[in-house]
Amino acid sequence: MNQTCEQVKEYLKKIRKYEQAAALISWDLQTAAPKKSIDSKLEALGFFSTEAFRLSTAEEYGSMLRELSRPEVFAGLDEAMQVTVRRNYRDYQRFQRVPQDFYTDYITTSGRSEKVWEEAKRAGDFSLFAPSLDKMIAMTKEYVGYMEPDKDPYEVLLDMYEEGMDSAAIDAVFSELKNGLLPLLSAIRAAGRPDLASLKGTYDIEAQKKVQDLLLSYIGFDFDAGAAAESEHPFTTGLCHGDIRVTNHYNETLPLSSMFSAIHEGGHAIFEQNIDSAYINTAAEQVNLMGLHESQSRFYENILGRTPAFWTPLYGKLGELLPPFKAIPFDTFCRAINDVHPSFIRTEADEVTYCLHIILRYEMEKAIFQENVPTDRLPALWNDKMEELLGIRPENDAEGILQDMHWSEGSFGYFPSYLLGSVYDGMFLKQIEKELGNLDCILEEGRIQEITAWLKEKIHRYGSIYNSREVIRRVCGGEVSAKPLLDYFRSKYSRIYGF
């Protein structure tokens, strides 16, 4: 193998060690760190992140990437290293333009901003968070401006989270969805909601954690290659190959929330656990294609988890671990997990209205970055858009603009990937049924691991070798389309609600 290629792999291994330390500190900050340790840990987070950044922008590294980028050398690299050289040299050129002092400040400001957001959310008071958000917006614009000075900042952010996507493509897909979903939601609302009074009650938190472990194991999460903890906002993080971690948030009156968060985060984790070990220390190991990543979490959560057949082999075990479910008829449970109605909290929304939650956030981000709407006007704009799309208006900021952590850490441009993931799922479902057979039959017989194996073979094992559009072409034989998702929604919910 090319000597420079081996040197790059060793260099990437060194960068990964610093990134792993930073990820572990970030995990601790969001799960178990005592309040008095925060400043010290933020300082350490800044140090390790800055060291990784310094290595990724060093001239030594750039020289190696330039050598491997030469056409006659590049042609001799394997696919994973070609992806690595192409993406990492692009990122090298971007990051070299970012001053190291600014980058350190950006990382530590982001960490502090998350903590301010947590306090503001608990208080339900946006004014506590507004100065931090204002700073994160300004710093994110500056950060992206350093990387790509001649491009629209929001277009750069969209591409960072879903390579190859831009606002024009997203506008087209989201417009098609919006036009199809609003009439569907009206028809569902006209049909009336089911009686779910039997689900009201108190559900032991420790028992909910046992249910989480059951669900994670059932869908294919490997506890020998991961761990679970508790946080304010559920998330998944990969520390290294063989250590992919998930978190959950529990509410003693909302057991379905933690159950579906477990399935969702488990989908993210299974994707990363199944990446071929041959891709360790290459760019292919890190899946920064968040639409593709979200497609896997949302496929497990919604396409599988909200299908009644998924629960046929599990419902008895659910009642054993969480006794209140023994008194809840299976049909009532199935109506509950497919209860479509407008609600305030994105992470607790049903799969239909969830799409509108993401369209709201996408429109908000365009207002922030492309229309320069002032920060103090954002809560009112959020509430107006929620009323327009969902017909409801938040009574406080905690159930409105403060509900998500993403903007506190500077993750602007991430939200659209959630809905793009659902669009991909409609296409994956169609292909799975074509190749494996009827989904209900597979799930009723407890053969969910066949689906996980299919996803691993078709998608997971490749990591980010292919971008999302390439994956759709390879797996489904076509281009990205919202039609299969809308067809799935219309077919499923016309049966459930009888229209």
Image (cartoon, rainbow, N blue to C red):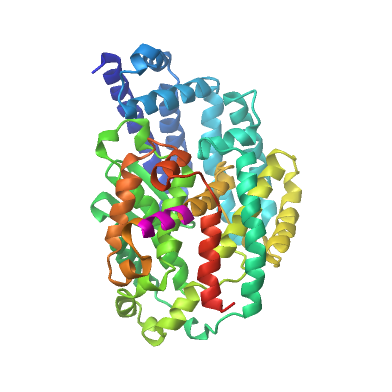
Residue 70 appearing in the image: yes
Tell me the quarter of the image containing the C terminus: bottom right
Q: Quadrant of residue 206?
A: bottom left
| In the image, residue 52 above or below residue 466 | above
Residue 124 appearing in the image: no
Residue 88 colored in magenta in the image: no
> 411 or 70, which lies in front?
70
> 328 or 132, which lies in front?
328
> 91 or 432, which lies in front?
432
**Residue at 42% across, 36% down:** 44
**Residue at 40% across, 16% down:** 69
Q: How many marks?
A: 0
In the image: residue 203, left or right of residue 447: right
**Magenta residues: mostly which secondary structure?**
helix
Give how far across and how far down residue 186 sits, in percent: 67, 70
| In the image, residue 345 above or below residue 358 | below
Residue 428 colored in magenta in the image: yes
Q: Quadrant of residue 345?
A: bottom right
**Residue at 31% across, 56% down:** 452
Q: Quadrant of residue 169?
A: top right
Tell me the quarter of the image containing the N terminus: top left
**Residue at 62% across, 51% down:** 174
| In the image, residue 144 above or below residue 291 | above
In the image: residue 483, left or right of residue 206: right
Give how far across and how far down residue 175 sits, in percent: 66, 51
Give how far across and how far down residue 467 sits, in percent: 44, 37
Tell me which segment is drawn in magenta.
Answer: 426-434
